[in-house]
Image (tube, rainbow, N blue to C red):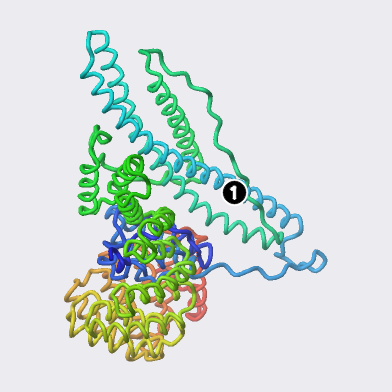
Amino acid sequence: MAETNRRKGRPWGQIRPENPAAGRLAAFLRAQVDGSGKTLAVLEKEISYSSTQISSLLGGRIPPQRFVTSLIQATAPAPLRERRQGEAEALLYEAKHPPRAMAPRASAATAGPGVPDLAAVQAQQIETYDRLTRALEQQAELRQTADNAARLIWILLGMIHKLNDRVGALGRERDRAVGQEVLEAAQSKLERARSQQAKAENELGRAEEKKQQAEALAARLQEQIKALTDELEFLRGRGGAAPADDLPGLAPFTGPAGPADPEGNDIDTALARVTAVNDTDSDTVHRIATELGEPVPVVVPDNRPTGTDAPNKTARELRAEAEAAMDSGDFRAAARLYALLTTASAGFLGPKDPGTLVSRYQYAYCTAEAGAPATARDLVAALIPDETDVLGADHADTLTSRHQLAYWTGEAGDPATARDLYETLVGDYERVLGPDDHDTLTGRHQLAHWTGEAGDPATARELMKDLARDQARVLGADHADTLTSRHQLAHWTGEADDPATARDLLAGLVADETRVLGSDHPDTLLSRYRLAGFTGKAGGLEAARELFRTLIRDETRVLGPDHPDTLISRKQHARYTGKAGYPATTRDLFGDLVADETRILGPDHPDTLASRAQHARYTGKAGDAAAARDLYRALAADVERVHGPGHPRALAVRRQLTAWTERAGGPGTEAD
């Protein structure tokens, strides 16, 4: 069964953040992935996180430092990497340190100094309400723009199919023409139809681009709306509603004068309306982007996959080019080709023809791989009833589509529905294929995964435990799927607040991965990193320190001393050394790390600044309050220069500077 073990694909569904800053961070990191052009399948090999973990962490959860750094290293262009890392670090800090809720307001009669008066609160209410209203209006405009573009895409796909027929018919008409006048008229119509083909293809590309740009801006606005709504609810106890706008009205279009060609005139009229809507939508996107102070989201244009005569290609040629695009990893081009093929096949053979059903599935699959799981979900949801009607509910293709529907539902940001779909599917797998079939086991893996993602790690742990046992029996203890499930079992065990058991599970897994995959395999190194982390969370500070020390040795040998994973492991080693009660050693570890991060990442990189803060902290804890004061003073100046004096990091450093200045007995001098 195709794609039943697939755990890849870009998960750009709805962001459900733990707090507004986490939502902004998720949107920012998603934009870096989009800009890199890399799929999750590629990224999971580069940053040592699985595609499902990447999807989850980019869905609004607060990710670990290691993930953020690795993702930026893998996606940001080298000239912008330091800047993007700084932006991501700032957002991560805000996500981890959300502002505390204000204490209940005192009455006007009892309000003391510094307590806002009623007029100030009301002014803030009005200002917040105005901003929220405008954001809702902008979001409604963007959603309408995306809807317009989606409708245009389907209209243009049908128009291209019809133009394919028209060009062919006009070519035959020209070849049969008798007489110069008739020949010239036929040639004129043919040239006009070919020009219309090119324009329809161009407008299709514009519509696709506008749809993606509008959706990206709307996602950014959603985080702003959430923050403003929270602020207004605090101030007033209620929010607002989003207005809905209609499609812009278009003036009637009169086609140009020319040979009698009513069908061509109709096509020109339709293309003119399409162009007008595209122009209006383009203006909307650029206007709102300007109002938000955001750059227009960059959409990398598709390479023209089939040349200027794409509509003239046969179904066999389109299918061959689509398959070639899939094989090369160009899923956006493949999705467009399969869309053309699906339109043509549905027109000639019908939407339920077996060949059309295959094209519809491939169209959905390539759409998901191109980064639009929500659209793919909707496409395959429409496909399943037709497959059930034509092939039967228990047919392999129907079951495959149901698997993909469940998976893409989860990837689109709805883990609870994905869990429910997999629960029903697993029952059908067991009835049709048997409990030990590979597809049944894969469905069970996905059921456990999405159960955990839906907020029930304890049940996910039990499901994964049973699955790992059955996979060991059916596939073998050393099979890749078995090892993967064991890793997930440890993960969900830790998520279920049992770090000690997670530690023990990972210890056994590391031993087996070392034997099966080798000690230097990325999966082994990742499991060792997480083993060290869960060991520390379970209270084994000395053991965690030692595990990180040996991991650093091997990462330095395998990855190199300057690799992001090596640097992150060094930071964790220093952290647990401090927790274990060795402030002087921790001071020296952070001092060495600061020197290397300054050389590799730059003096203003967030990691460098964070390590400098820890170096200053443990310098003080090691007994040298004056040196700690001086380190914090220098750090405060640099953090304020990089982030601004009002940034949370700058304020935190200032608080530490004040504390260590008091402990040192005074501010000292620069010469000190």
Q: Quadrant of the C terminus?
A: bottom left
Residue 362 at x, y = what percent?
A: 31, 53
Give the residue type that dot 1 points to: Leu
70 relative to 135 in the view: left or right: left
Left or right of 339, for residue 23: right
| Count of labels in the image | 1
Task: Work out whether residue 490 can be spotted.
Answer: no
Residue drawn at x 44%, y 24% as measured from the top left: 269
Does residue 492 sit above or below 383 in this rendering?
Answer: below
**In front here: 196 or 352?**
352
Counting from the top left corner in percent of width and height, residue 600 is at 26, 64
- Front-lying residue, 349 or 52: 349
Q: Which residue is mark 1?
A: 136
Image location (x, y in percent) of residue 66:
34, 71
Residue ID at (41%, 65%): 406
Q: Please tell me which residue lies in front, 220 or 244.
A: 244
Q: Is residue 391 above or below residue 344?
A: below
Q: Nearer the viewer, residue 662 or 500?
A: 500
Q: Residue at x 45, y 79 (%)?
A: 457
At which x and y percent is residue 532? 32, 84
Residue 386 is at least partly visible in this image: yes
* Residue 556 higher or lower than 204, as above or below: below
Residue drawn at x 20%, y 79% is 554
Q: Is residue 108 above or below residue 591?
A: above
